[in-house]
Image (cartoon, rainbow, N blue to C red):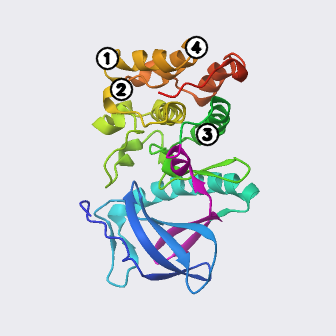
Amino acid sequence: MMDGRVPRPAGDNIQLGGILYQLNGAVVRGDMIVYTASVLDQEVWENILIRELYPCNNGIRRLENKEISITSDGFDMFLAAKSTAHQAQRLEQHWLQPYGGGSSFVEAYGTLYTVRTFQKAVPLDAMLCQSPIPLATALTLLNQLLEKVNDLHNAGLLHLHISPKKIYLLPDMHIILDYDCLFDKTHPEGYGCVEAPSCYDAPEIRLGNIQEICEAADLYSCCAIFFEMLLGRPLQEIDVLGKRLLHTLSQFLPPDLGSILFRGLHTLPNRRFHWAAELQQALTGLQPFSSYQHITP
């Protein structure tokens, strides 16, 4: 990895909370190294994610025995990252427990791990590959997403990588908002990742304008997903240039709905919705769902 943090290798076994897991792929994001995993030698039909707390700091490194070593130089940063990770884990447990999933913290190998599990579910991107989503369904899904985002922001956290791959649909159409790493909204400096930015990331994230990153970045992502649900294609960078977005929205969506999306996808964060509840309120002011006719671009 460019920042010097090296994940445990794929195929490595790790014991956490008395359970032996096999690690698969890994991604570095924020203060975490995130592994997909499975329970070793068991047929468990679960989606398992293991997050290893490993901030990028010269005082924090992995030893040859794979444990994390923290010197006095890295201790303060580690404690701050640990506090944010605890807050994220508690919120995740609150989200997952009603659906038979769970999130737990395990102290091991010199650091902390979050073990996140839920029954395997369909990611939203698989649904989006099929066709545009009817407006009533899209609004229901968006409202649930905004409720999760509101929880995040009220807890002092930012997601910064909301995308259809991080949203899972349960059989009853309830959603799970997954994450790799959540960020303290007063210190979002560690938002960077080894993956290329996606079309769902706000312009200030793609440009690295740290001082502009706030709750509006997450709401941009929500609106970008809503755009794709309604139009049947991802938002493209060219869409948000000049008056092109306004033209596209006015061509395919009713004016009141188009104006909401136009504001939510503004290139400048101070021109967007700043709170999830503010966007939800705008959506409740729409005409009844049945008055809209879905138009396929």
Seen at 57% across and 57% down, the residue is: 86
Q: Secondary structure at mark 4?
A: helix
Q: Nearer the viewer, residue 237 or 181?
A: 237
Q: Find disc 2 in the rendering and name its residue.
A: 239
Q: What is the CA distance from the residue labelled 2 to the residue labelled 3?
A: 23 Å
Secondary element at tag 3: helix
Image-based side of 189 in relation to 181, left or right: left
Please state which amino acid type lies under the numbered disc 2: Asp
Crowd band around label 4 with a 10 angstrom C-alpha radius: few (<14), some (14–19), many (20+): some
Report, in whole angstroms, how far the alpha carbon at label 3 lies from the one at label 1. 28 Å
Neighbor class of circle 1 (other Cα within 10 Å; few <14, some 14-19, many 20+) is: few
The answer to the question of whether label 3 and label 1 lie on touching residues, with beta carbons closer than 8 A, is: no
Query: Looking at the image, is mark 3 or mark 1 earlier in the sequence?
Result: 3
- On the image, the x and y values in percent for residue 37 come to 51, 72
Q: Amino acid at mark 4?
A: Asp
**How dense is the environment of label 3, judged by Cα within 10 Å: few (below 14), some, or many (20 and up)?**
many
The residue singled out by tag 1 in the image is 242
The residue mark sitting in front, 4 or 3, is 4
**Residue shown at 52%/51% (left/top)?**
126
**Disc 4 marks which residue?**
256
Residue 263 spot, x, y in % from top left: 48, 19
Kindly indicate whether the residue at mark 3 contacts the one at mark 2 (C-beta within 8 angstroms).
no
Q: Earlier in the sequence, mark 2 or mark 3?
A: 3
Residue 31 belongs to magenta span: no
User: Dot 3 corresponds to which residue?
Assistant: 145
Counting every numbered tag in the picture gives 4
Of tags 3 and 1, which is closer to the observer? Answer: 1
The 10 Å Cα crowd at callout 2, few under 14, some 14 to 19, many 20 or more, is: some
Q: Reading the chain from its start, which is encountered first: label 2 or label 4? A: 2
Q: Amino acid at mark 3?
A: Leu
